[in-house]
Amino acid sequence: DAGVIQSPRHEVTEMGQEVTLRCKPISGHNSLFWYRQTMMRGLELLIYFNNNVPIDDSGMPEDRFSAKMPNASFSTLKIQPSEPRDSAVYFCASRIDQYSYEQYFGPGTRLTVT
Amino acid sequence: DQQVKQNSPSLSVQEGRISILNCDYTNSMFDYFLWYKKYPAEGPTFLISISSIKDKNEDGRFTVFLNKSAKHLSLHIVPSQPGDSAVYFCAARVYNQGGKLIFGQGTELSVKP
């Protein structure tokens, strides 16, 4: 099994530009999560989906952030416009279903906004 | 409002000794607690879990203890090995909210030979 796949692994962009992060969950997993890792707060949950439906987006920092899951095998996290304070590592994770607790993480995307 | 807290950002231990990583929580609605391990440039990987109805779970060198009255859990690694050097995240699952996990800030463990 390939595991959770994220792209790109690194992204450097200028302030004001649009950034799109991509995630392919493990095949057969019905839940998908987007996290942001910061030194101060650790792993922050941004949004999660069950069966492609957004369940909780209360962690999305502001309207500049949006996430979609058009099908069971693909999700995007978009930041528009990006700001330097968005610089962080963004992780995608998937889970078999909403009843299990173990989440499987991708390798992350390191975003740098200059 | 940090519901899961890891107050020690780092810990250094000698190889062969015990490593103890601590985690405190504030929400009584957590039903499972988990520890994840993260190496640089990789995503976190699941290490061990404990149900809120238990007070101990052991898996090889790793043991997690839960003290519900103190809202505290700890991860013990015995004996510690250099390969255990990583960042450890404590996480808690919110009961009846679709399996949402709340993570702590992480503790970086360094095991010196």
Image (tube, helix red, strand yellow):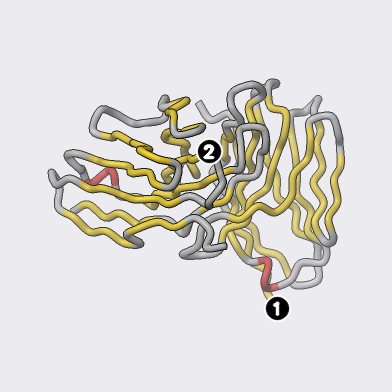
For the C terminus of chain A, the image quarter is bottom left
Q: Tag count in the figure?
A: 2
Which one is in front, A42 or B15? A42
Residue A1 location (% of width, % of height): 57, 62
Extreme residue toward the bottom, this view: B113
**Alpha carbon of mark 2 to alpha carbon of mark 1: how far?**
40 Å
Q: SS of the residue at dot 2?
A: strand
**Residue A40 versus residue B38 in the image, above or below:** above
Q: Are marks 2 and 1 in contact (CB under 8 Å)?
A: no
Q: Position of residue B62 (x, y in %)?
A: 80, 56
Q: Chain of mark 2?
A: A
From the top left corner, tell me how far across and down residue A79 is, in percent. Answer: 25, 40
The answer to whether residue A9 is left or right of residue B37 is left
Q: Report whether B5 appears left or right of A76.
A: right
Name the image quarter holding residue A62.
top left
Q: Are callouts 2 and 1 both on one chain? A: no
Q: Which residue is mark 2?
A: A31
Q: Residue at x 51, y 32 (%)?
A: A50
Query: Circle 1 sits in a helix, a strand or a loop, which is it?
Result: loop
Of B72 and A45, the residue lying toward us: A45
At 70% from the left edge and 44% from the top edge, which residue is drawn? B22
Residue type highlighted by circle 1: Pro
Task: Give the left or right position of residue B67, taking residue B44 as reference.
Answer: right
Q: Chain of mark 1?
A: B
Residue displayed at 39% across by 46% down: A74
**Where does label 1 land, which residue?**
B113
In front here: A66 or B104? Answer: A66
Q: Nearer the viewer, mark 2 or mark 1?
A: 2
